Image: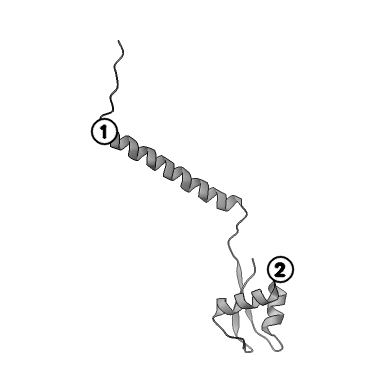
Amino acid sequence: MSKKLYLKNPIRLIFAFILVIFLSAAFMLLFQSTASGDSIPEYTTIVVSKGDTLWKIAKEYSNGNQDIRDKIYEIKELNNIGSDIKIGQELLIRVK
């Protein structure tokens, strides 16, 4: 004769079910972001030399699809600067 199983605490079953759904969703989001080609940004530091301008630096470090004005804005935001740069000043530049 088989023994019948009874659910003693249905709250635990509901909690376990919700936990499994939550963890599944978290793993899907984690793997989706890594699989979509999102990469970790890479930065370099440059030292401003004579004749350098933000436009020249932005043009050198922008990829072919990026507007140079957007790259200038990015450099200014990263370094918390205005439009003026000085010889010897170090600038953080996002390269990837």
Residue 10 position, x and y percent, is 29, 33
Residue 11 position, x and y percent, is 29, 37
Taking the image as shown, residue 28 lies to the left or right of residue 19, namely right
Give the residue displayed 47% in from the left and 48% down from the top: 26
Name the residue that disc number 2 marks.
63
* Badge 1 amino acid: Asn
Up the image or down, 4 lies above or below 78; here it is above
Name the residue that disc number 1 marks.
9
Q: Are marks 1 and 2 in contact (CB under 8 Å)?
A: no
Give the residue displayed 69% in from the left and 69% down from the top: 66
> Which mark identifies residue 28?
none
Identify the residue at the far left of this view: 8
The N terminus sits in image quarter: top left
Give the residue displayed 72% in from the left and 76% down from the top: 59
Disc 1 residue crowd, few under 14, some 14–19, many 20+, Cα 10 Å: few
The C terminus sits in image quarter: bottom right
Give the residue displayed 67% in from the left and 77% down from the top: 69
